[in-house]
Amino acid sequence: MRMPWRANVGLGFVIDRVGFLSMQYEWTGLNEVQYFFGSGFGELGREINKDIAETYRNTHNVRLGVELAPGPLRFRAGAHATSSPLASEEINGLFWKHGISGGFGVVGKNMALDFSYVQNRQNQRDMPYENFGEASPQVISENTQHYVGVTLSMRLQ
């Protein structure tokens, strides 16, 4: 099996020694996945690999983040977006994922306390059943997930 290609590039900038800005881009070639079958499966293997190439497409992931660290305080914010892996122009816009994140914390000599929040959103299209040749009902929903985290860390000496 050949797995998808993946390429990443990222940039980071220090902001006057009180923080940083980061940007990342990732490209994934999902339509490049291929199965390799043993002898006797030539036509089936070609069909499966053709279906993969026609069903999926390359995806793009973009992530941006900033963190400020004035003294013992830490403040951060970020955003991300991922394009749809589905090749169908009819439905690919429904499968974008995107989200935001933020957090703040306090750092001491031997302890740190941090609070974080992440919100992820994804649209989704479901077909509860297939009507074999006739139009099937569809449900288009937007899923939103919220995550909250608290971290207490201690340095052991």
Image (tube, grey):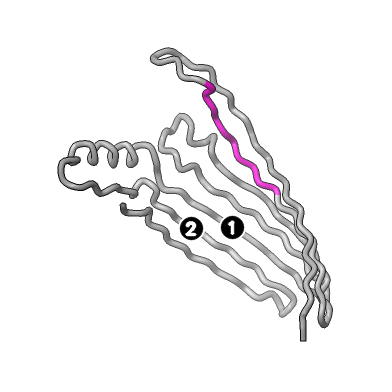
Q: Amino acid at mark 1?
A: Arg
- Residue of label 1: 63
Residue segment shown in magenta: 119-128
Q: Residue at x 23, y 46 (%)?
A: 37
Q: How many residues crowd around disc 2 within 10 Å: few (fewer than 14), some, or many (20 or more)?
A: some
Q: Residue at x 55, y 55 (%)?
A: 62
User: Residue 31 lies in magenta, yes or no?
Assistant: no
| Left or right for 110, reference 137 | right
User: Residue 126 lies in magenta, yes or no?
Assistant: yes
111 or 82, nearer to the observer: 111
| Left or right for 111, reference 63 | right
Q: Amino acid at mark 2?
A: Glu
Find residue 102 and report its image quarter: bottom right
Find residue 40 and report its image quarter: top left
Residue 26, labelled with which disc?
A: 2
Q: Where residue 17 sits: x, y (%)?
A: 72, 80
Quadrant of the snapshot with the C terminus:
bottom right
